[in-house]
Image (cartoon, rainbow, N blue to C red):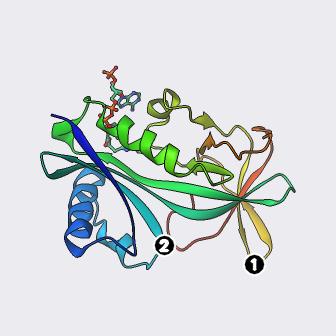
């Protein structure tokens, strides 16, 4: 079997495709993934189909990230990386991520907070070593214990991975 990849924004996705994403991610993450679909976020999905069935997925959304006291960078923030349990270890998850990594070439960088950090290393993701902060109403709060990985695009400036990394607050998982 081969994987058929489709990149589609939340503006263009069909109700059937949305339902398939919710079903896949709810099963893989053992939660009601429809919650995220109610947030009205502007995100882009990479869908992986095997024989017409959605079996692999990732998405990104726009998020500003600040390194140290530098300028805010335009990041593609990645979520929902999932392969159906029956279709793992066929390279599908990697294929979805490689497509995503090409698609986000226009961003300053990509970032994500992994539950399986080691899996991303072979795809070129690097661990952020410095302290992580969330900023709300001008105040920065440390978020110790979190893990963030970054992926460099052709536009990524020189980065000090030991510097502080700050993201704006958001009303669900902070990272
Ligand atoms: C992580 C996940 C997306 C990988 O999907 P996949 O389609 O099986 O990925 P691939 O086939 O491209 O890669 C599989 C390889 O990664 C390895 N791998 C899987 N999980 C790993 C992990 N946690 N750490 C390191 N390597 C891992 C496998 O051993 C396999 O290696 P091999 O081919 O040498 O045997 C899938 O296991 C999944 O959906 N897991 C549950 C959800 C999750 O953890 N998502 C990521 C959270 S940020």
Q: Quadrant of residue 15?
A: bottom left
Depicted 16 relative to depicted 130: above or below = below
CA distance separating discs 2 and 1: 22 Å
Q: List x then y, in percent, for residue 9.
A: 41, 67
Quadrant in which the C terminus is drawn:
bottom right
Residue that carries the numbered disc 1 in the rendered image:
137
Q: Residue shown at 27%/61% (left/top)?
A: 21
Looking at the image, residue 172 sits to the left or right of residue 162; the answer is left
Looking at the image, residue 165 sits to the left or right of residue 78; the answer is right
Looking at the image, residue 90 sits to the left or right of residue 113; the answer is left
Any mark on residue 42, and which? Answer: 2
Q: List x then y, in percent, for residue 17.
A: 24, 66
Q: Residues within 10 Å of mark 1 (few under 14, many from 20)?
A: few
Q: List x then y, in percent, for residue 138.
A: 80, 74
Q: What is the secondary structure assignment of the residue under circle 1?
A: loop
Quadrant in which the N terminus is drawn:
top left
Any mark on residue 172, and which? Answer: none
Q: Quadrant of residue 87?
A: top left
Give the total number of marks visible in the rendering: 2
């Amino acid at each position: 079997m081969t994987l058929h990849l489709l990149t589609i924004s939340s503006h263009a996705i069909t109700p059937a495709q949305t339902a398939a994403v919710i079903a896949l991610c709810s099963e893989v993450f053992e939660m009601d993934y429809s919650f995220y679909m109610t947030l009205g976020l502007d995100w882009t999905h990479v869908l992986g189909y095997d024989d017409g069935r959605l079996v692999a997925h990732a998405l990104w959304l726009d998020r500003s990230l600040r390194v140290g006291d530098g300028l805010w960078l335009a990041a593609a923030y990645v979520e929902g990386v999932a392969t159906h349990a029956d279709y793992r270890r066929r390279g599908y998850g990697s294929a979805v991520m490689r497509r995503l990594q090409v698609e986000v070439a226009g961003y300053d960088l990509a970032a994500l907070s992994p539950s399986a950090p080691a899996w991303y290393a072979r795809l070129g993701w690097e661990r952020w070593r410095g302290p992580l902060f969330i900023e709300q109403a001008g105040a920065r709060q440390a978020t110790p214990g979190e893990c963030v990985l970054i992926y460099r695009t052709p536009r990524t400036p020189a980065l000090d991975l030991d510097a502080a990394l700050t993201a704006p607050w958001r009303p669900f998982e902070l990272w």
